[in-house]
Amino acid sequence: MDGMVIGICLIVILLILVLMIVKIEQYMESVDKQLKALSEHILRKDDQYDHKDE
């Protein structure tokens, strides 16, 4: 009986870990997209400043 309870607990913990990892990966992907958009925006601003100096 105890062995089954421990087994079920381990399975539940593993499921939670997998779900957390998937959520973190999705979050990291959205953050990565935001960072790329930000860096592109900053690069465009730098280009504008370069043209103003000329």
Image (cartoon, rainbow, N blue to C red):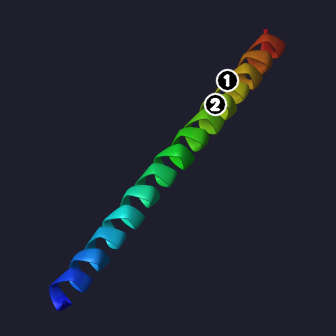
Q: Is residue 24 above or below residue 8?
A: above
Relative depth, front residue between 27 and 20: 20
Relative depth, front residue between 12 and 48: 12
Report x, y in % for residue 28.
Answer: 52, 46
Q: Quadrant of residue 13?
A: bottom left
Identity, as a three-letter code, of the amino acid under mark 2: Ser
Mark 1 = which residue?
43
Q: Residue at x 51, y 53 (%)?
A: 23
Relative depth, front residue between 42 and 14: 14
Q: Residue at x 83, y 15 (%)?
A: 52
Q: Residue at x 70, y 29 (%)?
A: 42
- The single residue placed furthest to the front in the displayed view is 1
Q: Residue at x 47, y 46 (%)?
A: 25
- The single residue placed furthest to the left in the displayed view is 3
Q: In this rendering, which labeled residue sits more in front, label 1 or label 2?
A: 2
- The single residue placed furthest to the bottom in the displayed view is 2
Numbered disc 1: secondary structure: helix
Mark 2 = which residue?
39
Report x, y in % for residue 11.
Answer: 29, 69
- The single residue placed furthest to the right in the displayed view is 52
Residue 6 located left or right of residue 29: left
Mark 1 and mark 2 residues within 8 Å of each other at the beta carbon: yes
